[in-house]
Image (cartoon, rainbow, N blue to C red):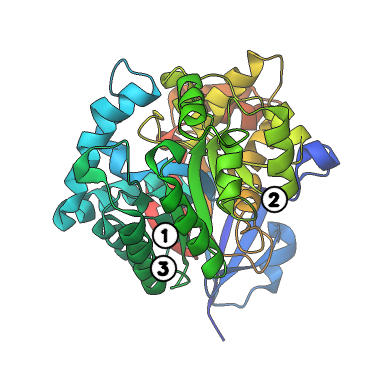
Amino acid sequence: MPQAKAYRAALLHCLADPREVGIEQSHEYFEDGLLVVEDGKIARIGAAADLLPTLAADTEVVEYRDALITPGFIDTHIHYPQVGVIGSYGAQLLDWLETYTFPNEGRFSDMAHAREQADLFLGELLRNGTTTALVFGTVHKQSVDAFFEAAEKLNLRMIAGKVLMDRNAPDFLTDTAESGYADSKELIERWHGKGRLHYAVTPRFAPTSTPEQLTLAGKLFAEFPGLYMHTHISENKQEVEWVKELFPERKGYLDVYEHHGLIGARSVFAHGIHLCDDECKRLGETGSAVAFCPTSNLFLGSGLFDLAKVEGFGVRVGLGTDVGGGTSFSQLQSLNEAYKVLQLQGQKLDAFKALYLATLGGARALYLDDRIGNLQPGKDADFVVLDYKATPLIDYRLSQATTLQEKLFALMILGDDRAVKETYAAGVSVHRKA
């Protein structure tokens, strides 16, 4: 029988979307809680007073004072090869790709560089409490091998894929429709379903793939069970117009992807700022998801994501950092900016909906809510310990809070990587703040 280990702190996790069931029914909270972990899974959760007497005498209990345990954060859109260009000045999407992104991604043809960057990237995710991410590689096969090697060593639940890009990009970053298909298939056979790893078919975005490549991407997506499809859509108005010029025979941007068999369950489209109502309706009908990337959308001047509109059509929505267009690995910082994006549109983002987007909402967007996203028994023991005394300001502000919602909201607005005391993946500590 596997040895249990228990963690004592305040515990908070989501049970449902507050939009669907109301705030009170959307979460479970234990002010003095106990989380019992066995064999990498959540075994039990409840009040410490109830569960402590039931533990075997030799069970180790780790106690965190002035701390909150939540599920590990989930990032539904991020680029690991772009860490080197985070915080680059003065460009919008298409110029930013040409000026910063493409030259930096060219370096990932070198396996040693890819391995170094994969370690750095995963270290940053875990330092910020993110335990699952949907990740862009580069066009190079070795970029994906390096990423999965590093994630496998840490037993992380990660999703990634090789970029498909056979036009409108520098020669050193293009593949062909045929080589992209063959390389992706080889990577799928090597990594998809290995441990806690999953593969995503990854056309960068419609303008950088020919119809032939998109057709083969759709073939690949249908060929293996449980694959993901990860791309961009309607991030920037200039980009939307470019798609219309390149695909005049299609009804719109989403129709390009649908025509090639690239929408449906486990299809995740980053951004979706400039989607029309018909496109939102179609995304909802097909079970596709959109990644809301607030720090990137503001930094690149792309626009404001209309959460109420997209969710109104039944579209699954997760939260993405979109590093390096995004400016922080921290999902607390993403929620800080998401709140402001919605404020500018007359919408409110309460603390419980915010936690939902960063945890269970992301899991549902990725069709992984049977395995991650909250702390229910049977789920993977991926969780984060947040420090109520992370900074003097956080400590002072939380001491003034009179409700859980107020405390959680202040932590979301003021928090960043400093608020993460410890991160666990499958019950193992993978980051501890010094």
| In front of the other: 74 or 160 | 160
How crowded pointer 3 is (Cα within 10 Å; few <14, some 14-19, many 20+) is rated as many
Which residue is label 2 attached to? 287
Question: In the displayed image of the protein, which residue is found farthest to the bottom?
Answer: 1
| In front of the other: 411 or 188 | 188
Callout 1–callout 2 Cβ contact below 8 Å: no
Q: Position of residue 241 (x, y in %)?
A: 50, 23
Q: Secondary structure at mark 1?
A: strand
Which image quadrant: the C terminus? top left
Q: Is residue 31 above or below residue 245?
A: below
Disc 1 versus disc 2: nearer the observer:
2
Q: Position of residue 297 (x, y in %)?
A: 48, 24
Disc 1 versus disc 3: nearer the observer:
3
Q: Is residue 205 left or right of residue 228?
A: left
* CA distance for labels 1 and 2: 34 Å
Q: Is residue 315 visible?
A: no
Q: Is residue 206 left or right of residue 356?
A: left
What amino acid is labelled 1 in the image? Ser
| In front of the other: 234 or 175 | 175
Of mark 1 and mark 3, the one earlier in the sequence is: 3
What amino acid is labelled 2 in the image? Gly
Residue ID at (60%, 33%): 252
Q: Choose top left, top right, bottom left or bottom right for residue 104.
A: top left
Which residue is label 3 attached to? 188
Residue ID at (68%, 35%): 279
What amino acid is labelled 3 in the image? Ile
Of mark 3 and mark 2, the one earlier in the sequence is: 3
How crowded pointer 1 is (Cα within 10 Å; few <14, some 14-19, many 20+) is rated as some
How crowded pointer 2 is (Cα within 10 Å; few <14, some 14-19, many 20+) is rated as some
Which residue is label 1 attached to? 429
Q: Choose top left, top right, bottom left or bottom right for residue 324.
A: top left
